Image (cartoon, rainbow, N blue to C red):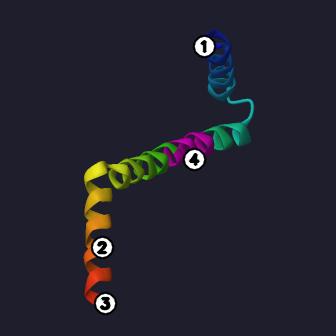
Amino acid sequence: MYLINNAVLNHISQVILDGKFHLLKYVFILLVIIVFLLITGLEKIIISAVNTIKPGNILRKNSSEGSKKLKFS
């Protein structure tokens, strides 16, 4: 799998270096930027999800909800 991906990337970079397809160069650059943004976005989502799943946060949320219910009732 890694060798196939490496061969494809080598071929794409060779085509870009040859300058045969200018459009392909821009598409490749955009693709790299989009992948980078997706990875950083997913990283933020995963970090926020992990922070909300921590047991301490759940216990604090439940205890605060319980105290609110007691105050209102």
Circle 3 or circle 4, nearest the eye = 3
Q: Residue at x 31, y 90 (%)?
A: 72
Q: Which residues are magenta?
A: 29-38
Q: Earlier in the sequence, mark 2 or mark 4?
A: 4
Tag shown at residue 72: 3
Q: Residue at x 62, y 42 (%)?
A: 31
Task: State the residue position of label 2.
Answer: 66
Q: Earlier in the sequence, mark 1 or mark 4?
A: 1
What is the CA distance from the residue labelled 1 to the residue labelled 3? 60 Å
Q: Earlier in the sequence, mark 3 or mark 2?
A: 2
- Left or right: 60, with 12 as reference point: left
Identify residue type, mark 4. Ile
Task: State the residue position of label 1.
Answer: 2
User: Callout 1: helix, strand or loop?
Assistant: helix
Above or below residue 58? Residue 23 is: above
Identify residue type, mark 1. Tyr
Circle 2 or circle 4, nearest the eye = 2
User: Callout 2: helix, strand or loop?
Assistant: helix
Tag shown at residue 34: 4
Residue in the foreground of this view, choosing between 18 and 27: 27
